[in-house]
Image: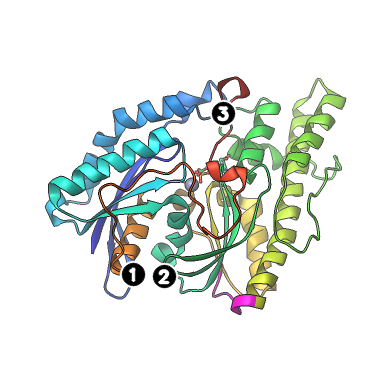
Amino acid sequence: MVVLGIETTCDETAAAVVERRGEGRGRILSNIVLSQTNEHAVFGGVVPEIAARAHVEALDHVIARAMAEAQQTFDKLDGIAAAAGPGLIGGVIVGLTTAKAISLVSQKPLIAVNHLEAHALTARLTDGTPFPYCLFLASGGHTQIVAVRGVGDYVRLGTTLDDAIGEAFDKTAKLLGLGYPGGPQVEKEAARGDATRFDLPRPMFARPEPDFSLSGLKTALRLEAEKIAPLSDQDVADLCASFQQAIVDVVIDRLRMGLKLFREHYGTPTALVAAGGVAANQAIRKMLHRLAIESGTVLIAPPPTLCTDNGAMIAWAGAERLAHGLTDPLDTAPRARWPLDETAGAHTTELTHRTAPASLT
Ligand code: KG4
Ligand code: ZN
């Protein structure tokens, strides 16, 4: 089964062709990601209108490259998948409408994929991870702990009540003048800083429900920075190290609770799976690895290029759904909000709003 996947929910214009073999193994035939980072960097965050326009300009070329590299033609495909949400609505409309057009012309089924489901199923593309597993999804727009029990069967165990972890990294970077996107920059500075210098809070510590809250940490960091301004290079590094350590401590604590809840309801998970851009952070990956061992399971963390947004994850989720006979009509609507677990309560972060500057949101 060969599926084209299209991703346009945020600031990456991406298309990929993925094959799903009979026994459920995956193979990436092409995976083209065009990042809009340069267009948004000057604003310090993603500007939705600029993102939508950039998707319109780039998507046709990105799809053509993905098809050429995979040596495919539309008539050879088994399905056309696109991320239909959640995300910035202008971008989602561009990707989904393009997928509908290709589906109509080539007479191949459309699969409207939930972007979060695509992150959730990536570990099956890379490692063939069997169900059920415990997913830690941490990106610029989402921070969730999810029990992944089967294709289309997700239970959200925990989420953030305010900022997403990636968003907290991005805001920290912006505050310290480190540029956008912030995660990699903060990680780089943290490597030469003293993590014990600033005593930052660990919000939600030891609370039984595995939720996150990060806005207090962000405020505490700002107050510490203001106290010692103007900041030297060493101050910036120490602030980054202290911030990253606080995040690592919070994630360990919250995931311990999440894994406990998972075991109570669904038994031992086959793996702790990491997904989303934040999973590219080496300090966080190391900690997740230790936590998985401590919890009697293993860590599956896809390579960083498949943790951040890409088309291969959309194509793969499309193939997994297609294998279950799940396709969608051509009048399927794009969705800005689309919780993975429809029964879970809605939180503001489901909007996938990244750190667009206040004056522009
Ligand atoms: O999954 P992703 O590419 O896009 C979203 O769906 O949001 O994640 C991007 C987020 C950004 O907030 C970025 O700062 C963060 O992931 N990120 C990192 C690192 N690399 C990317 N955060 C911490 N450490 C990193 N190395
Ligand atoms: Zn994402």
**Residue stretch rendered in magenta on the structure:** 265-271
- In the picture, the quarter occupied by the N terminus is bottom left
Circle number at residue 193: none
Picture residue at 78% right of the left edge, 53% below the top: 204
Q: Is mark 1 within 8 Å of ligand 2?
A: no
Q: Is mark 2 within 8 Å of ligand 2?
A: no
The Cα atoms of the two marked residues, 2 and 3, are separated by: 36 Å
Task: For mark 1, give the secondary structure.
Answer: loop
User: Which residue bears the numbered disc 3?
Assistant: 356
Tell me whether the residue at label 1 lies in contact with that at label 2, contact meaning CB atoms closer than 8 angstroms. yes
* In the depicted structure, whether residue 261 falls above or below residue 6: below
The Cα atoms of the two marked residues, 1 and 3, are separated by: 38 Å
Q: Amino acid at mark 1?
A: Arg
Which numbered disc, 1 or 2, marks the residue that appears first in the sequence?
Answer: 1
Q: Quadrant of residue 184?
A: top right
* In the depicted structure, whether residue 2 falls above or below residue 259: above
Query: Visible in this render: residue 310?
Result: no
Q: Amino acid at mark 2?
A: Gly
Would you say 159 lies left or right of 81 here?
right
**Residue 137 percent location from the top left of the image:** 56, 55
**Residue 313 percent location from the top left of the image:** 39, 54
- In the picture, the quarter occupied by the C terminus is top right
Circle number at residue 25: 1
**Residue 273 percent location from the top left of the image:** 54, 63
- Of badges 1 and 3, the one in the foreground is 3
Q: Quadrant of residue 28?
A: bottom left
Mark 2, other Cα within 10 Å: few <14 / some 14–19 / many ≥20: some
User: Which residue bears the numbered disc 2?
Assistant: 128
**Residue 278 percent location from the top left of the image:** 58, 48
Q: Looking at this view, is 45 or 334 the one in front?
A: 334
Would you say 147 lies left or right of 97 here?
right
